Image (cartoon, rainbow, N blue to C red):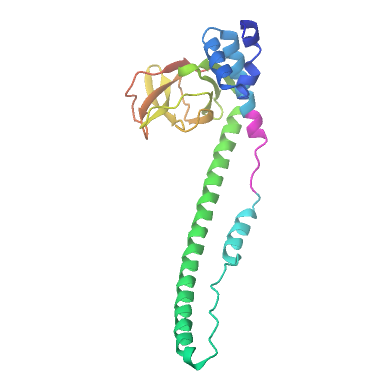
């Protein structure tokens, strides 16, 4: 693939439409091509905004419908054994009936436990959905803020990032693409930098290579950085920053 061809792949790279070999070759190209790095980062940020714009808020009645269906879905019941008609097997029939009763009681108890478990799972899922929607709304508010300012950057491992800052929202959003996985037991941690003083600004999801991270509490920060920290994060950086950049002005 020629250099001229590589210059035309920024859009496909931002939309993850390249093959593995093409993506690796284009990442090497980004390391030496500032215009493509800028364009790929801007296109990635645009794709993120479009995805947020098309997200849907669950209907208010959805929670009630889910919980109602959990308690009303019919479960298969054990079949009753056929009672023998002869006197010789009558006793066996009574024993089978007692066994069926005991089994039915056990099944009823298990069904109650299953219903409770299903109810809790539904509650947990709804809570996670609400939290995810709230986080998405906060990120969208920063990206759409009238005073939003954006800066693109190259991140470790050939990844690209776009930092959007809103002084009015007192927040920033870092959208990253193709971030390499951190080592086991480690996580990428974001920091606000105020004239050399670093303070925590959020953690990246170690399982996602493409993501947008909300950074709250902008205050008087002049820059930001990323370090590799133990799972759960650290109150202060414990490693040399992988990258540092000034906030867009």
Q: Nearer the viewer, residue 81 or 234?
A: 81
Residue 60 % position (x, y): 64, 52
Residue 52 within the segment the image draws in magenta: yes
Task: Say which residue appears at 46% left-offset and 18% top-offset.
Answer: 157
**Region in magenta:** 49-58
Residue 181 % position (x, y): 44, 27
Could you tell me which quadrant the C terminus lies in? top right
Residue 131 % position (x, y): 53, 43
Outermost residue to the bottom: 87
Q: Across the whole image, how many numbered discs are drawn on residues?
A: 0
Please say if 149 is above or below 122. Answer: above
Residue 26 within the segment the image draws in magenta: no
Residue 145 visible: no
The reply, left or right, for residue 199 in relation to residue 17 is left
Residue 158 visible: yes
Could you tell me which quadrant the N terminus lies in? top right
Q: Nearer the viewer, residue 245 or 6?
A: 6
Task: Say which residue appears at 60% left-offset and 62% top-offset.
Answer: 68
The reply, left or right, for residue 24 in relation to residue 197 is right
Task: Say which residue appears at 66% left-offset and 12% top-offset.
Answer: 8
Q: Nearer the viewer, residue 114 or 99?
A: 99
Residue 104 % position (x, y): 49, 75
Q: Nearer the viewer, residue 126 or 10?
A: 10
Which image quadrant is residue 75 in?
bottom right
Please say if 158 is above or below 132. Answer: above
The reply, left or right, for residue 139 in relation to residue 190 is right
Please say if 120 is above or below 139. Answer: below
Task: Say which residue appears at 55% left-offset and 10% top-offset.
Answer: 29
């Amino acid at each position: 693939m020629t250099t001229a061809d590589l210059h035309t792949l920024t859009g496909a790279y931002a939309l993850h439409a390249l093959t593995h070999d093409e993506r690796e070759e284009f990442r090497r190209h980004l390391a030496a091509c500032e215009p493509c790095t800028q364009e790929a980062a801007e296109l990635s940020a645009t794709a993120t905004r479009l995805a947020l714009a098309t997200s849907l808020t669950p209907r208010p009645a959805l929670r009630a419908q889910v919980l109602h269906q959990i308690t009303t879905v019919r479960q298969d019941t054990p079949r009753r054994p056929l009672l023998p008609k002869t006197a010789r097997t009558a006793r066996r029939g009574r024993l089978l009936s007692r066994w069926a009763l005991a089994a039915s009681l056990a099944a009823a108890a298990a069904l109650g436990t299953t219903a409770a478990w299903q109810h809790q799972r539904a509650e947990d899922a709804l809570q996670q959905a609400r939290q995810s929607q709230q986080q998405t709304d906060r990120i969208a508010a920063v990206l759409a803020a009238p005073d939003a300012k954006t800066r693109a950057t190259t991140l470790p491992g050939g990844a690209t990032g776009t930092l959007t800052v809103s002084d009015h929202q007192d927040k920033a959003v870092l959208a990253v693409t193709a971030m390499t996985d951190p080592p086991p037991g480690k996580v990428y941690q974001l920091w606000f930098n105020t004239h050399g003083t670093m303070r925590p600004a959020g953690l990246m999801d170690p399982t996602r290579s493409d993501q947008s991270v909300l950074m709250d509490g902008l205050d008087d920060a002049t820059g930001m950085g990323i370090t590799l920290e133990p799972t759960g994060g650290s109150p202060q950086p414990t490693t040399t920053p992988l990258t540092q950049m000034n906030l867009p002005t």
